[in-house]
Image (cartoon, rainbow, N blue to C red):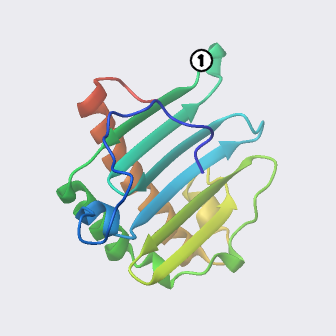
Amino acid sequence: MLRDSIQPCARTTTTTTTASTMSAAEKDPFYLSTGHSGKHGHEFLEFEYSHGRLRYANNSNYRNDSLIRKEMWVGPLVVKELKRIVEASEITKEDDSNWPKKNIVGKQELEIRIGSDHISFETAKIGSLVDIQDSEDPEGLRVFYYLVQDLKCLIFSLISLHFKIKPI
């Protein structure tokens, strides 16, 4: 989901990796990616977690802002909390077939691989709770909306603590 590569991280890897030498983060199939893009296509905000690495990208083009990309390695407790948030939301029980389709305003996406479940959702960009109430599946869309908000809150907190910047 993230565009291009993000600043390289200092990490040593071996050329031959066996199951016995892989870390817990490398063995874990947990994957999380969420983001939205605006009506002009070049505006986007994305998060991606995979194998211990958390990536963030933001391109608002507001007043000629430049692209912001951040990447950090997170520990097992952060991963455990990400999983807990996803599992508590019960998003894997939802279906996006009755959600608003992407339109000229933009789109929001969420992809999760947790345990044996691999889900991917796409819907129109949600501007307010009124958009949710007016949909054909308000309960499912509400679960999606609050999960994405919870994930953004946690990830923005991590970014603020790690990089000492103010994201949007």
Vertically, is 113 above or below 46?
Answer: below
Where, by quadrant of the figure, is residue 116 drawn? bottom left
The residue to which callout 1 is attached is: 65
Q: Position of 50 compared to 52: left or right? A: right
Q: Secondary structure at mark 1?
A: loop
Q: Residue furthest right?
A: 104
Give the residue type that dot 1 points to.
Answer: Asp
Residue found 55% across the figure and 62% down from its top: 110
Q: Could you say which is closer to the camera, residue 118 or residue 99?
A: 118
Residue positioned 51% across, 26% down in the render: 68
Residue 70, given in percent of the width and then of the height, sits at 42, 32
Q: Is residue 36 left or right of residue 114?
A: right
Q: Position of residue 108 (x, y in %)?
A: 62, 55
User: x and y percent of residue 37 in the render?
Assistant: 67, 44
Image: 2 above or below 149: above
Left/right of residue 24 with respect to residue 159 in the rendered view: left
Residue 49 occupies quadrant = bottom left
Instruction: Give the residue at x 58% y 74%.
Output: 138
Residue 88 in the image, given as x and y percentages of width and height: 32, 75
**Farthest-out residue, top:** 64
Q: Residues within 10 Å of mark 1 (few under 14, many from 20)?
A: few
Q: Residue at x 42, y 30 (%)?
A: 167
Query: Between 121 and 118, which is closer to the camera in this rendering?
Result: 118
Nearer-the-camera pick, 134 or 124? 124
